[in-house]
Amino acid sequence: MINPRTFEPQNVNDCVFGNPRAKVTLEDLVNGATPFPAFGKCGILLYGAWGTGKTTLARLIPEAMEQARGGSDPTVRWVACNGPNTGTSTVTTIVSQTQLISGNQSGLHYVVLDEVDNLTQLAQQHLKSAMAYKHAVFILTTNHITEVDKGVQNRCHLIDMNAAQPSDWLPQVRQVIAACGAPVPDDSVLLPIIAAGNGSAREIVSSAVAVANEIRRQQAA
């Protein structure tokens, strides 16, 4: 039985970026080469199409930032912006928590708002006002950046997570196939399979496992 977690990114460097500049920008924010939070920006906004790894990356950023600042295993406030979590009361609760002293070694509060575009316009305006604390980091994800308040965007570093090129996925796909116990085919075989995934990590990794299973079946025949 294959453990699916084997194929999940374990750190920021494991994630596949379609935009090299975006990767460098994020690395500089995480490791402190670019002061952050600072200069009126306390957010990281990950935007792009479905399945490109935004939520996975959002989960990894707090740990990476905390480690770079001498800590580990930070407390993170995670908010899935759907159902009852789309109004001003959600933002009010977040603000109240970030006004307290952080228990993280870095002294930072980490707040993740997944699919932030689902917040109401009024809630986004409240969020904009809340993004003024130098001891709070807001990590936001969206599939629809045009639906995110311009003021919120202005308080964030924007990280383009749109689809990577098939060649960018080759190392991870090779790793998945090898982990499944199958010999890795030539790149000429893998590239069309990756391209068919249209940049979706879910589709690409699932296809890689399917390729490995087919190879193993052929070997056993």
Image (cartoon, grey):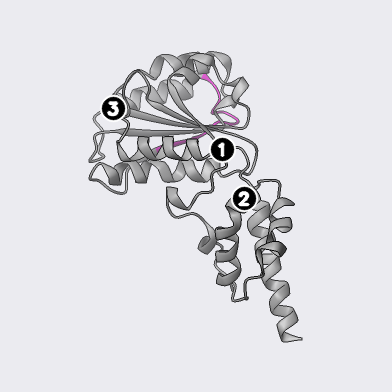
Rendered image: mark on residue 201: 2
Tell me the distance, in whole angstroms, between the alpha carbons under discs 2 and 1: 11 Å
Q: Sequence-wise, which precedes: disc 2 or disc 1? A: 1
Relative to 63, does residue 3 appear above or below in the rendering? below
> Which amino acid lies under the numbered mark 2 shown in the image of this protein?
Ala
Q: Sequence-wise, which precedes: disc 2 or disc 3? A: 3
Query: Would you say 206 lies left or right of 91 here?
Result: right
Q: Position of residue 221 (x, y in %)?
A: 77, 86
Q: Nearer the viewer, mark 2 or mark 3?
A: 2
Relative to 111, does residue 150 appear above or below in the rendering? above
Tell me the distance, in whole angstroms, between the alpha carbons under discs 2 and 3: 33 Å
Q: Which residues are magenta?
A: 77-87
Query: Would you say 217 lies left or right of 30 here?
Result: right
Rendered image: mark on residue 15: none
Q: Secondary structure at mark 3?
A: loop
Q: Are marks 2 and 3 in contact (CB under 8 Å)?
A: no
Quadrant housing the N terminus: bottom right
- Residue 209 within the magenta-colored segment of the rendering: no
**What residue is disc 3 on?**
135
- 168 or 13, which lies in front? 168
- 166 or 78, which lies in front? 166
